Amino acid sequence: SPPSSRHRDKETEFVTLCKSLHVTDLVCDHAWTLWKTIQDSVEELEVRIYRNKSLWGSCLFATVTDMDTASFTLTQLLKAVSLKKMDVNLDTISTKVNSALSHLEKKYDVMLALYQRFEKTCKSVFASLCCIDASHVLHSAGRALQMEDDLVISFQLLLCTLEFCIKRCPPDLLQPLYKSAISKVQSPPGRTARRSQSKAKSRLPESEVDLQLLKTLCQENDCNSEEVKNVYQTSFSAFLDSLDLSGSAHLPQVGGYQEHYLKSRDFDGRLFLDGDETVLVLPAFRSQVERTPKKMSDEDSTLIPPQTPIRAAMTSIQQLRGDLTSSGDQPSTNLATYFKNCTVDPTQDVVKRLETFGETFSQRFGQAVGPHCVALGRQRFNLGVKLYYKIMEAMLKSEEKRLSVQNFSKLLNDSTFHTSLLACALEVVMATYGGGGGDATERNMCFPWILDVVELTAFDFYKVIESFIKADPTLSKDIVKHLETCENLIMERIAWRTGSPLFDLLRQEHEGETAEQVETTANFSQPLQHNHTAADLYLSPVRPGLRVLPPETAASPNTQASSQPPTQPVSQPARPLKSNSLSLFYKKLYRLAYTRLKMLCSYLLSSHPELEPIIWTLFQHTLQHEHELMRDRHLDQLMMCAMYAICKVKTVDLRFKTIVTAYKNMPNTSQDTFKHVLTTDGNYDSIIVFYNLVFMQKLKTNILQYASTRV
């Protein structure tokens, strides 16, 4: 039928699409307005490839996500428009839409990885195609336990599901390996005995888990059987308790997935089983697939296993657990000796602190991942404790060798040091397991989540990162890269939040006129040379008021500094105490800032190489002398403003829009950096507003000194 008078300005096919998806007139209007906004920026080739209908689907998805008024699921949209692309123009897509897309992509990655492993395992387990029932159990378990988006836990649930289903299948439907793996073929346990138990008891009796079968499944899938057993006895058993098995020898009829799918309004995971191309070939959500195995060398016939997401995750977990096999959840004999050698033995404080954080961490983990995952959180915490003790011992051995002392009382009685070291160990565990969930960003479990859990400032956390990496040579490249990324996030943004101790240190340093001088840019290409360890940084001298001490007093990390000013004149020239932690922070900050500026200049100013050192001079001056501009802001905001300012006074035509467009192509950037900038009085606006109202006003005199001489 022809469009109503309200929609006469729209194409008939677009209105028909809206009606087929049952969207409201308001959604139809907003989606059409969005389409008209981006239409001019869409390349003609894109229109030919994707067709208007596909691009309309992108606009509808963005509109209903922003308005929270979805009347269709993602699968329904995909089928209606054969959607192959979402972010047709990032300038018009909100942070909310990007977050929703990120969530869907991560969930899809988990679903596809599970399906690939599920299909492969089913072929090796079942002699017939009875795995469909097992898939229904898995879907329902994931839904009930709210863990569908967590790759590691979902994979462990998959193995639990297979164990549950295999032992309930007739033996003649099983492959020989699994037929022999079952401890004893028996009919499923009845519910009578369980019903007589206390309802508060959620664990299944040990006998209901076929440990031999579970172990076989875990061996076949490179997974730790103890972890899967714990998942079975906590999370999966809670799900089984919700089923009515009624003593039947058949698999239970479980449902609810359709209702859950319609409520979540994303994609229908059951389409994997149907081979539906909507979920199997969609480029926007395509995950890494198995590659053809390659030989390691011509002489060596060993094959490198395909690096699927699950295999990569399991390999990382096995490596971490293997590295900690010899580490206990109690201090080793050597570490205990270090504790006893202290003037004040820190043992009791360490134990009490771990007990407190263990309870907090497991509860917060359960809140983020799922209500039945508190026990899993405790397991992750225990791994973190083992790593914490291991790294602490390695650090102390290194300090003993460096300083020829064994009494580390001041360091080992510093609660901030212990909390930072524990937080770093837990972050390594979380990163190894995939951040605690395949959808870590959505659940806010990615860094700096751990800092909030242990109530630690980012600046204090930064002090331990480099020493932590050096203390454990077994850390994988991915984990080292992750910790370095955390350090960069701290330097560029997190450490500059209001309330950070960084501002107090900066104030004290500038009062004492001991501000850190920047290295020459020529040195930035060389490795950073310094002799600071974690002990130096946590015991870093701070200038309280006008107190002065001789230089050698400040240099010793184990010297108990007096809280009173010296009553006798010092024999050497006195000086303000310098903060090692601040000094190293700024050395690294300058390197990061220069690296990012150099990249942006390569994108935009390759024809004006003479401007780069001038922009850097202004940028570095801002960080050193106008550091309040960084409060609750991002390093890149000052970088873009410095570039724009110098180009403007040098009469080089470079618009902010051009800078922002190039900036979006840099790695690890976010639209919020230029769209959501603190201006004045707690207000937020675009970066150009920040430049005009704040940056230019603060640095006007400094900027104008670089102005080109006008004829």
Image: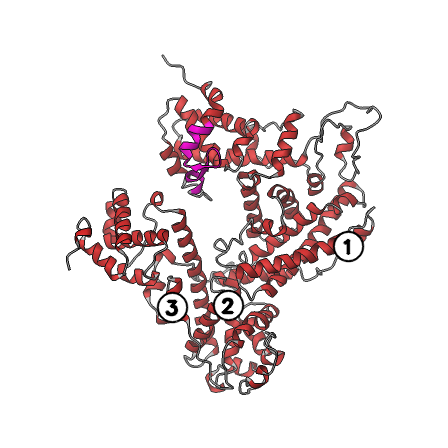
Inspect the magenta stretch and tell me whether residue 673 lies in it.
Answer: yes
Q: Which mark sits nearer the N-terminus, 2 or 1? A: 2
Callout 3 secondary element:
helix
Q: Position of residue 633 (x, y in %)?
A: 50, 37
Residue 330 sits in quarter: bottom right
Residue drawn at x 75%, y 52% is 349
> Are discs 2 and 3 less than 8 Å apart at CB?
no
Residue 521, above or below 46: above
> Are discs 2 and 1 less than 8 Å apart at CB?
no
Can residue 609 be seen here? The reply is no
199 relative to 162 in the view: left or right: right
Q: Which residue is mark 1?
A: 348
Badge 2: how crowded within 10 Å, few (<14), some, or many (20+)?
Answer: some
Mark 2 vs mark 3, CA separation in Å: 21 Å
Q: Which residue is mark 3?
A: 272
Is 688 in front, or is 181?
Answer: 688
Callout 2 secondary element:
helix
Number of marks: 3
Q: Which residues are magenta?
A: 672-695
Query: Looking at numbered disc 2 in the image, what kind of residue is underneath it?
Result: Leu
Residue 337, above or below 255: above
Q: Which residue is mark 2?
A: 145
The quarter of the rendered structure image containing the N terminus is bottom left
Inspect the magenta stretch and tell me whether residue 634 lies in it.
Answer: no
Q: Which mark sits nearer the N-terminus, 2 or 3? A: 2
Q: Which mark sits nearer the N-terminus, 3 or 1? A: 3
